[in-house]
Structure formats: C-alpha cells, structure tokens
Image (cartoon, rainbow, N blue to C red):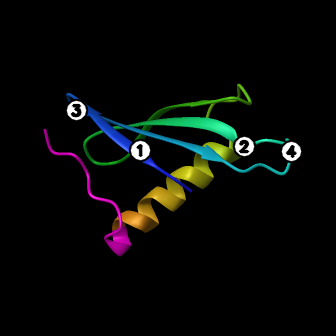
Amino acid sequence: MLITVKREKDTFIVESFVPARCATKPYHVILFLDKNLRLKKTACDCNTPFCTHSLRLYNHFIAEIGKGKIKLPMD
C-alpha cells in the first residue's frame, strides 16, 4: 500500500488506495490526523465516515511508523 503524508498546520493528511472486498477496485481514502496522530476526520470513496477502509489504512499507517518505514513531515 503506497501511503502519502502531508502536513498542513497542525493536521497530518494521510492518503492511499485501500483494497476492498466489497468493490472491484480499491477505495481512495484520506485521513485527517491531529498532531498526536489521533483521527479527526476521514474521507473514503464508500461515503461512510470512519469506515473499515479508513480504519484499515490508519492501523497500517501507525504500524509502519512504529517500524520506522514512514517518517512524518515536520514543517
């Protein structure tokens, strides 16, 4: 899963395409996190807030940070 991370003021924006069993193509998911990496808001192609696709991306994102594979932008 290719993850892009941007920072705007005190918000991290995490974006990726998440594979889904309920669709033939992956869903485009955007996470909005506060400075402590807590979820503030989500956006997904399935149009459900805080859906399973968003939570799957969030869990993967946090795990990758823990492994040191993702570095957060500190602008």
Q: Does the magenta stretch include residue 55?
A: no
Residue occupying image coordinates x 41% and y 44%: 4
Residue occupying image coordinates x 56% and y 51%: 57
- Image check: 59 left or right of 22? left
Does label 4 or label 3 sit earlier along the sequence? 3
Q: In which quarter of the image is the N terminus?
A: bottom right
Residue 13 at x, y percent in the picture: 38, 36
Q: Name the residue under label 2.
A: 26
Residue 26 at x, y percent in the picture: 72, 43
Badge 3 density bin: few <14, some 14–19, many ≥20, Cα 10 Å: few
Amino acid type indicated by mark 4 = Cys
Q: Mark 4 points at which residue?
A: 22
Whole-angstrom CA distance, mark 4 to mark 3, is 33 Å
Q: Is mark 4 on a helix, strand or loop?
A: loop
- Image check: 49 left or right of 3? right
Whole-angstrom CA distance, mark 1 to mark 2, is 16 Å
Amino acid type indicated by mark 1 = Thr
Residue placed most toward the observer, 6 or 42: 6
- Which label number is shown at residue 27? none
